[in-house]
Image: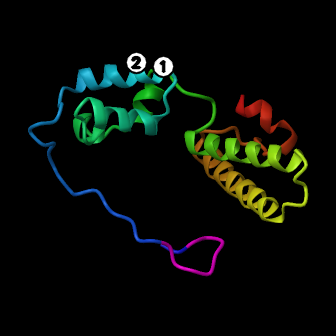
Amino acid sequence: MARMYAKRKGKSGSTKPHNETAPEWSNTDSKAVTELIVELGKAGHSSASIGTILRDQHAVPDVRSVLGGQRISAVLAANDIGGTYPEDMMNLMRKAVGIIEHLGSGNHKDLHNKRSLELTEAKIRRLAKYYSGEGRLPSDWKYKRDELRLMVE
């Protein structure tokens, strides 16, 4: 896959092995896995960290194969756990807050991070357009840099 803001190709990534069934050593109890997901979600973990914990500590290599195609975020949404914003958008907003703090604390001439902030804000706007079309954000939601810290906290 090519990079969005650079004139070079990206590193090739690995793909998950295509397996129809879970291995015999894995935990395939869907009720127990769902309870673990809800418990970890209530503890404040993100869906990515929940997947890592399930893989490393509870012998669940692929949650979707155990839950019949359902994702971790869908289980969390069904149990009303999670924030008002999607996880990937919240991560970008946290990144933008960190860059704004860096630029505001005496580093206002840091041109590389000014550019990085512009690119991050463009990604946030693009995701907001997608999520408002999907119905996961209000259609009148706008990105505002001065209200960003309130949205993240």
Kind of residue at badge 2: Glu
Q: Check disc 2 and report its element: helix, strand or loop.
A: helix
Camera-side residue of 112 and 69: 112
Q: Which residue is mark 2?
A: 39
Asked if the stretch drawn in magenta spans residue 4, the answer is yes
The residue under label 1 is which amino acid type?
A: Ala
Q: Name the residue located 63 percent from the left edge and 40 percent from the top edge.
A: 90
Quadrant in the picture for the C terminus: top right
Residue at 37 percent of width and 25 percent of height: 37
Measured Cα–Cα span from mark 2 to mark 1 = 6 Å
Q: Residues within 10 Å of mark 1 (few under 14, many from 20)?
A: few
Closer to the camera, 144 or 14? Answer: 14
Q: Which numbered dot is residue 61?
A: none
Q: Position of residue 92 (x, y in %)?
A: 65, 47
Circles 2 and 1 in contact, beta carbons < 8 Å? yes
Q: Which residue is mark 1?
A: 43
In this rendering, position of residue 149 left or right of residue 45: right
Decide: few, some or many residues near mark 2? Use Cα within 10 Å; few <14, some 14-19, many ≥20. some
Q: Which residues are magenta?
A: 3-10
